Image (cartoon, grey):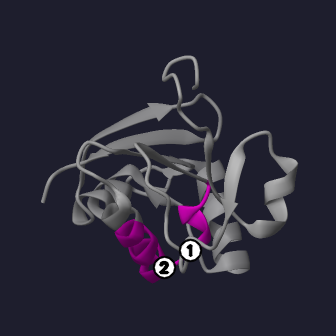
Amino acid sequence: MRVAVPGSVRGGLLLPYLTDVSPFVFKPGDFFRDPLPSAELYVLCRILHDWPDDKVHKLLSRVAESCKPGAGLLLVETLLDEEKRVAQHALMQSLNMLVQTEGKERSLGEYQCLLKLHGFHQVQVVHLGGVLDAILATKVAP
């Protein structure tokens, strides 16, 4: 990233016990309580599926409050199909998340609704070819 944007800092918010094992610059913190750093792109990789809807709304609200218009939000998650019947791996993963974390996998439609509710639009999805999908959205002005 430093090549593409001279002077940029690679980093983010990470649980305190993980900050010493990464080549990136991270601030220790809890994304439900601590201030989120200012950024042009927020990346939540396999985060939202860990949480029930109320916690997802809280987290997306916090990201939306920290975002300036034009900032991006990249979600990397396993997407369920809209009928929640076809993607067997995603269905098994969703059951696993429910049992272990109270979370769940969601469909693209569910993510689009969540993102729109928190001011993110221009949603694009890229199927990464494995079990994960990338969802990119842009924060719009209120």
Residue 63: assigned label = none
| Alpha carbons under labels 1 and 2: distance apart | 6 Å
Kind of residue at disc 2: Lys
Specify the farthest residue to the front. 7
Crowd around label 1: few <14 · some 14–19 · many ≥20 (10 Å): some
61 vs 69: above or below: below
Q: Which residue is mark 1?
A: 51
34 vs 118: above or below: below
Q: Is residue 120 left or right of residue 20?
A: left
Which SS type dominates the magenta stretch?
A: helix
Look at the numbered disc 2 and give the secondary structure of its residue.
helix
Q: Position of residue 90 (x, y in %)?
A: 60, 53
Magenta-highlighted residues:
46-62
The structure residue drawn at horizontal position 40% and vertical position 63%, both measured from the top left corner, is 63
Kind of residue at disc 1: Trp
Residue 55: assigned label = 2
The structure residue drawn at horizontal position 62% and vertical position 38%, both measured from the top left corner, is 10
Q: Is residue 41 left or right of residue 27?
A: left
Look at the numbered disc 1 and give the secondary structure of its residue.
loop
Q: Position of residue 78 (x, y in %)?
A: 57, 49
112 vs 30: above or below: above
Q: Position of residue 72 (x, y in %)?
A: 37, 43
Position of the C terminus, as image quadrant, is: bottom left
